[in-house]
Each structure stands twice: as structure tokens, then as C-alpha cells.
Amino acid sequence: MILNKYGDLFGTGLNKYIFAGNCRTAECCRAGGLPDIFHVYFRLMRIKHFLLTGAFCTCVVVANAFQGPHVPASNQKTYGGTLRAEDQQTGSVRGRITTADGSVASYVSVVLKGTKFGAMSDENGEYHIKRVPAGDYTIVVSAVGLFPKEKQIRVSGNGTVIADFSLKEDRSELDVVQVNGRRNKFKTDKVSSSLRLQTPLLEVPQNIRVVTDKLIADQLVFDIVDGVTRNVSGTVRTGHWDAQYANISTRGTTIPAFRNGMNLKMPWGPLADDAATIERIEFVKGPSGFMMANGEPGGIYNIVTKKPTGENKSSVSLSGGGYNLARAAVDLDGKLSADGRLLFRLNVAAQTKGSYNKYNYTDKYVIAPVVSYQVDSNTLVMAEYTTQHVEAQALGTYGFSPNGYGDTDPSFFLGDPALDPAKLYDHNVTLYFTHKLNADWKVNAQAAYVKYGLYGGTPWPSKIAPNGDMRRYLNISEELAINKNAQVSLMGDVSTGPVIHRIMTGVDMGNLKTWGDFSSVMHGDLKLRDNRPFNIYKPEYGIPADSIPVFDRSRSIQIRSGANTYATNVTYTGVYLQDELRMLDEKLRLTLAGRFTHAVTVGKADSIHVSDNAFSPRVGLSYSITKDFTAYTLYDQSFLPQAGQDYFKNYFKPVRGNNIEFGLKKDWFDGKWNTSAAVYQITKKNVLTPDNEHSTGNRAYSIQLGEAQFKGIEFDVMGEIVRGLDVVLNYAYTDAKVTEDALQSRIGNHIANSVTHLTNGWLSYRYRKQGALLNGFGLSGGYQMQLGRFTGNSAREPNLPDYIRFDAGASYEKGKITISALVNNLLDRRLLTQGSYTELKEQKADAVNYYTYIYEMPRNMRLTVAYRFK
């Protein structure tokens, strides 16, 4: 049994390769008839040996990388290493560019005068010019709005020159800087440092899409639930408790929420991030072994919060709109010390809005201060705190009908104004430490603590009659979750002959504890005055006080949920090592990586206590056909622990996910816009299916015979197509089906909430001509289409109505002020974000099968006035 649990960690073919050797191999043991436990021992020891060897080699490489001559010369430093003789005649130049007040100078041109060698500073003001022939040069840095500067440097073979610059602002050109700085407001070239990847997006062998804060503002999005998935191919949000958290899927599987690279996945959260705190959202398609392995194979989304920049990106905005929407947001970004080493950023937002449901509303506020301190030129420490508070009359806007989807009016409200609203909170503290060991290596460490809670009650139907009479019950709803995470990573480059090794290694740990009480107090029938029935077609409201139960919270949530299934404790530790080998002048890049994860799910009994060890390999290949056109392929794995046993007392093995992907990426017109295409196949094995042979009326068993397969095509376009016109276009075809199951009739069924054809578009045009009457005027608009939608676990044909929506808006920008207006759901279509069907074991005269669904918000308008301090 133990061999079955661990025997498929690598696959038969890879086992023979990894464990091949002398007589102490798994094959030799089997030939000698040793017990299965020895097979397991050898496998686990080999895994441990593999990772420890990799870590040891990394340390040796790093130690060697830190050695070499060190020659300071007026803010210039040279580091050496060992190269082949023919490579010792070239070196490199790198550095950091700031303004006179210490602010980062991004996108500054850096060239070696009179040569073809040059670079552009990145978001952190850093640049790197590689493979420069040895000799004397004049390095020139320049940008619109900054006075240019020159410096004499000497490049030696096998060396790196460090040349930093501090530039003065040219006030006469600052308006031009503001215009040009928005050239690529939708497109970005690199992921955030929280994803740990050091390679440009064009060269990463994986489909990663980034939604920038400028795109979020252009679409007047106020939180993660508010339509951001339209910007990513094959990604949808399924409606649920929308006032609470975002239920997002890509490639047919639900994906977890990360915040600044930390896994915050919870059963009921985290709370949906407010746009006021978001710098960007990164959607990573596939298992994402470099970030995590214990999760669904579809991918992750990573919220990157706003950090201090020292550039005074301060702003204030006021918004209003339909359904009593009112919102205010303040973003303060500045310095706490004159030298710019101590920085702060404070984001505060408050919002109130009604609903198309009668009596429903959602009020919330968020406060997010961040402080950073540049200890020295190589060391940065930062502390961040975010708190959100939400009050909602109902967390979801569900509708119900015995006759079909969308049968009731959107104004239908399941709850009642006499019931107490739900209250939610979220506290997140994160500490960061970054240190550059030298020009090529750095170490990052961060730790996060998240506490989330809910107080409220949930009404829900207990039965629905054919004429629409509904009986509602009310149960207590209280949740508590505490999530702790810590990460340490080491990354850098080292050369071995003509090959550059881009190393990334580290360890991450996490612990999630949850408690929930949904049953200690339950009232079976919420009655109206005079016992009048509640009818979904003609609803009446106003439940008498004596019909509303009192929730007893005198004992803690830990005590009340200690005996139920909502008290959980999950811990994981992961060790990973990745080597990206950059060959043929870095045109060919081979990624070899592995992650070993130990995950423990604490159970109240041995039958539900799970301890899993899993190795997840990652192999990628990327080739630059031209400097702006790459092709790639990727193989990646994931695993998801499962608690419980089958009828024969065998522990369930983790769900394993395998992803095979091929893709093309192309930058156009000097990187102004980008296209990408990907083809993938994901296979989930060890999926649980019902064991009808051994299940009885009192006990249901599962058997681990299930498999699901997800095949698809993805295509994305993003960037500035022509001057002033920014575009987001995407299309995805997804075929998600059950391929193996204990019940033959289930094979071929589509996966719940999958969408066969998904396409989105967004166009934003801004007219720019100094002195013209319409200078600063803009138009925007977009569409969302979901065709071939499936709900439930038994669908062979699409069974949820198609989703087709159009939006349109206009804006005007003058100086530091922007006024934007947008109409969502322009055609006022009745659209559904979710649907399901409840089938009763036995139907009666007053209780029949019924449909459940959630409407998209009807046509509504938003207006925002924003002022930028700089």
C-alpha cells in the first residue's frame, strides 16, 4: 500500500533513470524480493539526495561567483569569474539610475557612444548591457524630462563595470514625460519580483498575463470581482459570495489567490482585494511549480500591492454611479526622509453601493500603509499592513426557480431587511527583506500573517413548490481563518563557459488553520407575519422579530467548530531548485527545475490524517527565433492532498496534475504590443469518484479511479497597436471532460463551470495633439462572450445560457485631472454568472427540483474624477 502511495512520484520511465546505478536500486531490490517499505525508503532517500545535492552545488556556485577581483574606482566596481579564452575579451556594464532627489528613473536610455550596444532601465531603474568588447567607452544616459549625462568607463575582459547615475529633472519637458510615460499602459515586459522569475516575459516558457493598474483604472474596476478576468484568455469568474471573495478559474480549474507571492488560498477567502491597493495582477497559467506545487494544475493569480516608489505617485479619486454607488480613494506616495531612503505609501478607500436585489447593499473600507527603508545600496527592508472591512446585507445575490435559469426578476432577494447584515474583516501583515550579495546575486525573504473572519447568518431555501412558494431556513454563519507564510529565496546568474546559469532556489512554508460554525444555531422556517408564504414571483418582506433566532456566540468559534468538519489544520514545506541554462548567446534557454513538498493535513482521526511527500519536476525550453519572437514548450506538475480512505481502508493518494504546453510569443513595433498563442493539455489523475458497489444509505464511499483532462488553445493581444490606441483582445477554446470514472456513464461529461469558447476585447483610444480642441479626449469600450457553458457534473451539452456583454465609455484628461465615465452591460441583457440544479431524492407537492443562479448586474453607469499630485 505504501508503494502505491509514493510509487508514482516520478513515473516509471523517470524512475529507471533517476534510480539507476549500483545494486542498491529499486529494480535490484525488487529482484531480491525486499519488502515494499524498502522501495519507498530508497525513493525518498533519492529525492532527498537529489535536492540536497542541488542545494550544495548551488552554494558552491554562489561561493565561486562571489570571488574574484574587486576594483573600486569612483562609483565603478569590477567583478570577475572564469570564462573560456574566447569569452575573456568581453565584459558587461550594469548600474542603477535615479533622479537627483533619490527617485527611481525608469525607462531611461543607456548607450555606449558610437556603438550598437545599449539598454533601457527597468521599473527599478536598473540596466544591464551584456557582451561588450573590452575597451574604453563613453556611456550616455538620457530620457525626456531628464538632463542627459555622460561617464567614461573601461570594460575589461571577463569583468562587469558598475556605473550608477543620478540625473536632474528638466522641468520644461515634464508634460511630455507624462504623455510618453503612458505609451504602454496595458503592456508590461516583466513580472514582479514576488514571482521570483528574473527572465523577461517574452523569454519565459509559460503563458503569464499581467493586468496593470492603468488597465484596471481604464476599465473603472474597483475590486478583483469587478471584471478583471476579461483581460486574460480562458479565465472566468464564477458568481458565488461576491461580496466576500473572488471565485476565479482558468483552463477549467479553480485557481488560488496569491498576494505578493504568498499563497492565501482559504476555503472562504481571502477577501476580494480592492483596486486601491493593487499595482498589478499576474495570472500564471499551468501548475506553477516555481511558486507552489500543492494546488490545482490550472494556475494561480498573484495580487501585487502598491509599494513606495519615491516618485510621488499620489492621487485622489471620487466615484459615483448606478445602484447608489459612492466611492472615495486616496493614494499617498512620498518620502519620510530627505535623502529618499525612508519611504511610505498609504492607500485608503471607502465605498458604499446598493444592489439590483431589493434591500441588499455592500459597504466597505480598506486601509493599507507601507513603509520601506533603504539600509544601504544593497539592502532594502519593508513592512506592509492591509486591513479590509465589509458589511453586506447578503454576501451573494442568488435567484431560484423550479422552472429554469433566469425565471425570476433580478430584484428578487432571498434575505430580508429585518435580518442582521454580515460583517467581514481581513488583516494582513507582511515583512520583506531584500539584499544584493553582488552585481549578480540577491537573496529575498518575506513573511506574512493573515487573519480573516465573518460574523453573520445565511438564509437558504429548504424547499420550493411548483407555484414558487419557498420555505426558508436561517443558520448561523461564522468563519475564522489564520494563514501564516514564510519564504526565503536565492537567485542570480553564473557562467560556465558560454552557458549562463540563471539559478533560483529557496524554501517556503505555510500553515492554514480554519474554523467554521454553520449549524450550532438553525431556524428551520422564517415566517412572515400571519404565516403568509414567501413566494419567489411575488416576494414580501418584513419578518417579525419573534420569528428570527438569536445567535449564541458566547463561546468562541474554536469551541463551537471543534467537533465539525470546518476545523482544519494544513501545513506544508517546499524546497525548490531551478536552473535556467541560457545558451547560444542566450537565444536558447533550457529550464530544469524540481520541487519537493511535504504537506500534512491534521485529522481528528487516523482515517482523515494525511501526510504526503511529492516531487514535482519542471522542464521548459524557450528559443528566440528573432530578438522579439520566441517559441517555447513546458512540462510541469502539481499535486493536491486528499484526506480519507476507501472501503478497503486504503489512504487516498494526492491528485496529480500534469501540464504539457507549447506556445509562441511576439513583440511588435519595438515592444509596443505583444501577441501570444498557447496550446496545452492538463491531466488530473487520482480524482475521487463514487463507489456505488460498497456505498449504502448510511455511508457513502469513494474510489480513486477518476481522471479529468483539460485541452485548450489560448490567444492574447495586448498593447498600443497604433499611436493612442491601446488594445486587449483574447480568445480561448477549452475542452474539459471526465476521461475515467467508476461509472461509465460519467465518462465524457464536461467539467462544471467550464466554458468552451471564451473571447474578450477592450479598446481604449486617447487623442493627443497639443493645442487641439479635443486634446486629451478618449473613448473606450469592450465586449465579453462566453459560449458553450456547462454547469453541474453530468452535462454532455451546454446547459447554461451564453454570456454576451458590451460596455462603452468616454474620458477627458487635462493636466493632472482625468474624468472618466463608463456604462457597463450597455444592452441591459439578463446575464448569469453562475448556475446549478438541485435534484431531490423525492419530489413532493410542495417540494420539487429547482434551479439556482446569479445575475450579472444590469445596465449601470460609473463616473470617476481623479487628480494626480504629479
Image (spheres, rainbow, N blue to C red):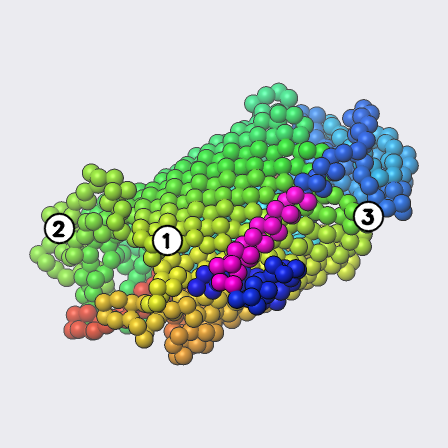
Q: What amino acid is at disc 2?
A: Ser
Q: Answer with left or right where residue 763 lies relative to residue 706.
A: right
Above or below, 688 against 69 in this view is below
User: Where is residue 591, by image quadrant?
Assistant: bottom right
Q: What amino acid is at disc 3?
A: Gly
Q: Determine the secondary structure under disc 2.
A: helix
Above or below, 104 against 194 in this view is above
Q: Quadrant of the N terminus?
A: bottom left
Q: Is residue 721 visible?
A: no
Residue sitting at 76 percent across and 40 percent down? 128
Depth order, front residue of 614/78: 614
Residue 17 image offset from top left, x and y in percent: 65, 63
Say whether disc 2 or disc 1 marks the residue closer to the N-terminus: 2
Q: What is the C-alpha distance between the residues marked 3 and 2? A: 80 Å
Say whether disc 3 or disc 2 marks the residue closer to the N-terminus: 3
Residue that badge 3 annotates: 497
Q: Determine the secondary structure under disc 1.
A: loop
Depth order, front residue of 789/673: 789
Residue 780 image offset from top left, x and y in percent: 56, 54
Residue that badge 2 annotates: 547
Q: Answer with left or right where residue 207 lies relative to residue 219.
A: right
Q: Nearer the viewer, mark 1 or mark 3?
A: 1
Q: What is the C-alpha distance between the residues marked 1 and 3? A: 50 Å
Q: Nearer the viewer, mark 2 or mark 1?
A: 1
Q: Determine the secondary structure under disc 3.
A: loop
Depth order, front residue of 674/632: 632
At label 1, counting other C-alpha atoms closer than 10 Å, the crowd grade (few under 14, some 14-19, many 20 or more) is some
Residue 658 painted magenta: no
Residue that badge 1 annotates: 609
Depth order, front residue of 387/511: 511
Specify the label residue 493 is tagged with: none
Residue 50 painted magenta: yes
